[in-house]
Image: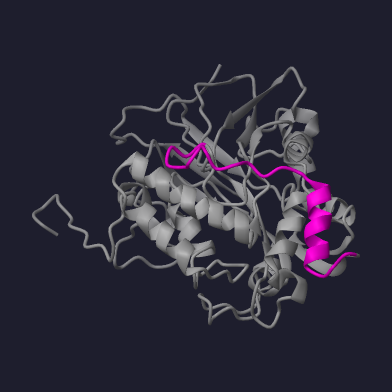
Amino acid sequence: ANGGKTVVFYLDAPTAAFPYLTSNTTYQSIIQPSNYKLGSFSKGGTTTGAFRLTSYSPGLGAKFDRNPGWWGGSAPLDGVDVTYYTDAAAVTAALLGNQIDMISQVSFSDSRALFNNPNIQIITAKGTPHREISMLVSTAAAVKPFKDRRVRQALALTLDRPKIIKQLFNGFGIPGNDSPFASIYPSSDPTVPQRKQDLVQAKKLLAQAGYPKGFEVTMTTQKYIEIPALAQIVAASAKKVGINIKLNIITSDAYYGGTYSGGATGRGTTPWLNTPLNITDYGHRAVPNVVTSSAFKTGGVWSSSNYANPAFDKAFDAYSASLTLKGQRKYTGIAARILLRDTPVIIPYFYNWTMAGSKKVKGFKASAIGTMDLSKTSLG
């Protein structure tokens, strides 16, 4: 602390995006009192928002009332009742039956009845939520084919990305380019070539790597929103070049379960870090720094591929330290081209955060991070 209203941060390295890394788009940046005890949130208490928590039932829901001391004035709504659902069909039926007014997230793949209903409004926000199809490139759990980057490139080339976005998201998304540097980031280099489906080249690469007839591998992933449908698309696409993918789709609890202590040496037994081929879900970030350092840099704590390349690390560190947009684009361009060459991970798309609501809902704007700011929302 430096005085009553100033806090000074000493960083380990230059980080131009530091303000973003302390915002609510970095989920790990929430600051709590030093005496905070687990479970205290459920009792309500101090808040800086338009509503304050008055009751919370784990697994069932929560109730919020208008906060009369909110610095922003007075929210139009008296309060907000939140109900938790575990099934997409149930929450869709609740909205169509006027039992609720909004759904915090909907997927075109399992809530299609909402997308063409004249009584429902679809509310979206462009962002960087995405899926990472990771191929383990080292460790004992890696399969031999994925140790060759030509095989990894071949699998990436089997995907028709615009078609996948249309099928899974009704067009609410943009193609991914197998790096976390989404095109909507101002810092991303727009000159990096977009990877497209090329089955001829995919077969050529497999043959060069010694797999002219393909190979077999198991893909492990979770039952979460559109991911099972994506897994089926990947398997069908890979089969066109001889790669036979068997699917092992498990619950999210099982996928992220097992032991894990972090980093390259603490991979434990959790499936999302120890299976040769898997699909992991990632949410929106205002800048690509956290996802990149955790999932792509050497020793990253979320690295499902266990990828390591000093040249990539150097380019990313230079991007992080660069204070100009020109410099940031220079180094994201270098880093993105390295990832296109090495392809430890396939990112087929970045999708819009999509919500659904009754036409009665007024004044609400979606956030790509999925937070629900209802401070200006009313029911007309």
Residue at coordinates 76% horizontally, 44% vertically from top-left? 197
Q: Is residue 302 left or right of residue 354?
A: left
Which x, y percent locates residue 217?
83, 69
In the rendered image, which quarter is residue 132 located in?
A: bottom right
In the rendered image, which quarter is residue 358 located in?
A: top right
The answer to whether residue 30 of the structure is visible from this angle is: no
Looking at the image, how many numbered discs can be counted on the residues?
0
Is 204 within the magenta? Answer: yes
Residue at coordinates 79% horizontally, 51% vertically from top-left? 201
Which x, y percent locates residue 286?
44, 44
Is 201 within the magenta? Answer: yes
Q: Is residue 323 above or below residue 92?
A: below
Q: Is residue 232 left or right of residue 51?
A: right
Q: Is residue 236 above or below residue 293?
A: above
Is the N terminus in the top left, top right, bottom left or bottom right quadrant? bottom left
**Between residues 122 and 242, which one lies in front from this camera angle?**
242
Q: How does the figure colour the protein chain or chains?
A: one colour
Q: Is residue 9 above or below residue 76?
A: below
Residue furthest left in the image: 3
Residue at coordinates 64% horizontally, 59% vertically from top-left? 343
**Between residues 215 and 71, which one lies in front from this camera angle?**
215
Q: What range is drawn magenta here?
A: 184-212
Residue at coordinates 46% horizontally, 49% vertically from top-left? 332
What is the magenta segment's predominant secondary structure? loop
Q: Is residue 352 above or below residue 230?
A: above
